[in-house]
Image (tube, coloured by chain):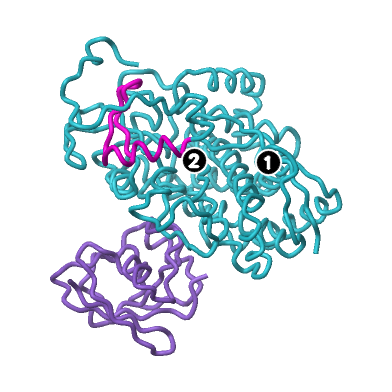
Chain colours: A purple, B cyan
Amino acid sequence: MITVKYVDHLGAETQLEVPAGTSVMQAAVNGGVAGIVGECGGSAMCATCHVYVDEADAAKFDPISPPEREMLECTTSPLSETSRLGCQLILRNDHGAVKIHLPESQQ
Amino acid sequence: MSDTAEMTRDDIRAPRLDIDPFSDDFLTMPYPYHEQMREAGPVVWIEPYQVWGVARHAEVRAGLNDWESFISSAGVGLANFRTEKPFRPPSLILEADPPQHTRARTILARILSPKTMQQVRAEFERQAEALVERLVEQGEIDGVKDLGEVYPLRVFPDALGLAEDGRENLLLYGNMVFNAFGPRNHVFMDAVGRYEPVRDWIMSKCQRSELRPGGFGDLIYQAADAGEISLDEAPLLVRSFLSAGVDTTVNGIGNALYCLAQYPEQYAKLVAEPAKARQTFEESLRFESSVQTFFRTVNRSLEFAGVPMRENDKVIFFLAAANRDGRQWPNPDVFDIDRKPIGHMGFGSGIHGCVGQAVARLEGELILTALAKRVKRIELIGEPVRRLNNTLRALGSLPLRLIPH
């Protein structure tokens, strides 16, 4: 299990224990975390699972693929250095704990 | 169909079902058959066609996401392009695998992106409101002919950059293409017969001279100018817009109207909160999926869900059955607009997931929003008529009365 802490734009935190192989988007949807929509179900097609990975954790994930980069141009909230699509961030046991910051809006 | 040697295949380690997914009976009311397949096992063998069938959500999702095992370049219908001649030059995106697929996909995904939707939204909204206004005055309407067909044929070809004349030909083309993923049955033969007279018209509309500069179609030619694809490939990619962009949303909207007419308490919830239009459309895609099935081809011998499969076997994935799998959805046969069915298979999943899904969602959301704001009740005033299609869940007519606020 991986511990994922979601921090919304107002600072409210939700902590989830997530099995390996789950995406940051899917875990949030399953766990009822508001602030992630995930409309397309994880196909990198909708840009509604935009997250800011905490700087301390950003290097843990695979680099951004070309389709993800294109879709990141479509987010409604501004991008940061660590902006990602939550559906492309697959959690692994060696991640230990990760912190994910949520944007103000997704649609 | 297979020869006699194939019929005696003795390596089938899954339930053998004598179900024809392309019979009139199945196409008219697929849900009992879906349940039978889901309950039989994670993978079944469809005896009449000698193909594998996958109907549970977890396995449909897993199979569609494993594009290296279950390939598309050998066709996403019953035919295997490795052994049979394709009925048309294969699509550059639908009937392709990476890396060829990636080039085409990148271009279309950019053209149909959420960012583009923000640009076309105001015009799509204006058209939705104007149409609903006209239909409210009309009072009694055919939800398919007067709304489901009219709206997509207005906004999508406009965005594509097509002239106004002859747009209804796109319905005949889409109907034919989606029928062609099934067998050469009477439903398919009928669709081909009606498509033949407009074949040349369709292909001519893929040419650059027919496409308004700056429209979605022209953007494909601009991608060719930039060297992303060849100029020869551009008309073939425009063809994907013409085949996949209309009959899908026509039925998406028609099916949503049918759901809301059948379940007035759900429509009442939408009227009370029109902001639920987008999730309502999403639930209708789960409950009555426009696109019911797609095939893949097994790339090399493998085991899937514990079942050994051979190279070149065809596999039919029942998207619509996955969308009513009780393993995934509580009360799957209940239409509930508050469900928010993230992860439904109505647009497929993985690298071949519908590239136009943002357009489809926009059209559905805007039509349902316009209705909710202007129409208090939608009443079914006659028996809906099914239009059978080997891939699509479609209505030919849907008699409705719109009661304004």
Count of labels in the image: 2
Residue B396, placed above or below residue B47: below
Chain of the residue under the numbered disc 1 shown in the image: B
The amino acid type found where label 2 is placed reads Val
Please state if B101 lies on the left or on the right of B259 as rendered.
left
Instruction: Depth check: give the residue in front, A46 or A81.
Output: A46
Task: Indicate the secondary structure of the residue bearing disc 2.
Answer: loop
Kindly identify the residue that appears in the image at 66 percent across and 44 percent down: B157
Residue B278, given in percent of the width and then of the height, sits at: 57, 61
Left or right, B100 with reference to B299: right
Task: Place residue A4 in its image quadrant.
Answer: bottom left
Range of residues picked out in magenta: B30-54
- Label 2: chain? B
**Horizontal arrangement in the rendering, residue B273 relative to residue A96 (left or right):** right
SS at circle 1: loop
Q: CA distance from mark 1 to mark 2?
A: 25 Å
Question: Which disc is residue B291 wearing?
Answer: 2
Residue drawn at (46%, 48%) of the image = B346
Mark 2 residue crowding within 10 angstroms, few (<14) / some (14–19) / many (20+): many
**Residue, disc 1:** B162
What amino acid type is highlighted by mark number 1? Leu
Looking at the picture, how far across and down is residue B75, in whole percent? 37, 30
Q: Position of residue B18 (x, y in %)?
A: 34, 24
Residue drawn 30% across the image and 50% down it? B58
Nearest to N terminus: mark 1 or mark 2: 1
Q: Quadrant of residue B403?
A: bottom right
- Taking the magenta stretch, the answer to whether it contains residue B271 is no
Q: Residue B248 location in percent, x, y?
A: 56, 42
